[in-house]
C-alpha cells in the first residue's frame, strides 16, 4: 500500500485564481453585450467593484502562488475571492437592464 499523496494547495490556488481571472475577463464581454437601457453607459460602472475584487484577492494570490509562499492561506484567499465575485455578480445581474 502507498501513502495517499497530500493535497497540493499551490496547484489548487492556481486553478482557483485562474477561474477567478477568467471570470473577471468574461465580465467585460458580458457587460459589453448588456442592452443599452437608457443609453448612458452606466453599466460600465460595474467594472469597478469587480476590478477591486480582482485586485484585492487574485493579484496577491498570483503573486503568492508564483513565490510558493503560504499555499494554504493562498488557497483560502482565492476561494474568498470567488465568493466575493459571486455575491457582487448576483447583485449586478439584478441591476442590468433586461432585453
Image (cartoon, rainbow, N blue to C red):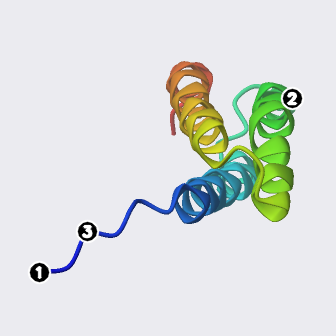
- Figure quadrant of the N terminus: bottom left
Question: Mark 1 sits on what residue?
Answer: 1
Residue lying farthest left?
1
- The label number, if any, that marks residue 42 in the structure image: none
Q: In this rendering, is residue 24 above or below 67?
A: above
Residue under the point 67% across and 42% down: 74
Q: CA distance from mark 1 to mark 2?
A: 52 Å
Left or right of 25 on screen, residue 88? left
Q: What is the spatial separation of the Cα atoms under label 3 and label 2, in whole angstroms?
A: 43 Å
**Disc with the residue nearer the chain's start (1 vs 2):** 1
Residue occupied by mark 3: 4
Farthest residue to the bottom: give it.
1
Other residues around mark 3 within 10 Å, as few (<14) / some (14–19) / many (≥20): few
Residue in the picture at 75% in, 35% down? 57
Is label 1 or label 2 in front?
1
Residue holding disc 2:
48
Q: Position of residue 65 (x, y in %)?
A: 75, 58
Tell me residue 89's x, y (percent). Answer: 57, 30
Asked if 23 appears above or below 15 in the picture, the reply is above
Q: Residue shown at 34%/69% (left/top)? A: 5
Residue at x-position 51% and y-position 32%: 98
Amino acid at each position: 500500500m502507498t501513502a495517499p499523496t497530500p493535497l497540493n494547495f499551490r496547484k489548487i490556488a492556481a486553478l482557483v485564481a485562474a477561474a477567478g481571472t477568467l471570470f473577471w475577463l468574461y465580465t467585460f464581454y458580458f457587460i459589453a453585450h448588456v442592452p443599452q437601457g437608457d443609453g448612458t453607459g452606466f453599466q460600465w460602472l460595474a467594472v469597478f467593484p469587480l476590478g477591486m475584487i480582482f485586485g484585492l484577492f487574485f493579484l496577491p494570490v498570483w503573486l503568492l502562488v508564483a513565490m510558493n509562499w503560504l499555499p494554504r492561506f493562498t488557497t483560502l484567499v482565492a476561494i474568498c475571492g470567488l465568493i466575493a465575485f459571486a455575491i457582487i455578480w448576483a447583485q449586478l445581474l439584478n441591476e442590468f437592464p433586461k432585453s
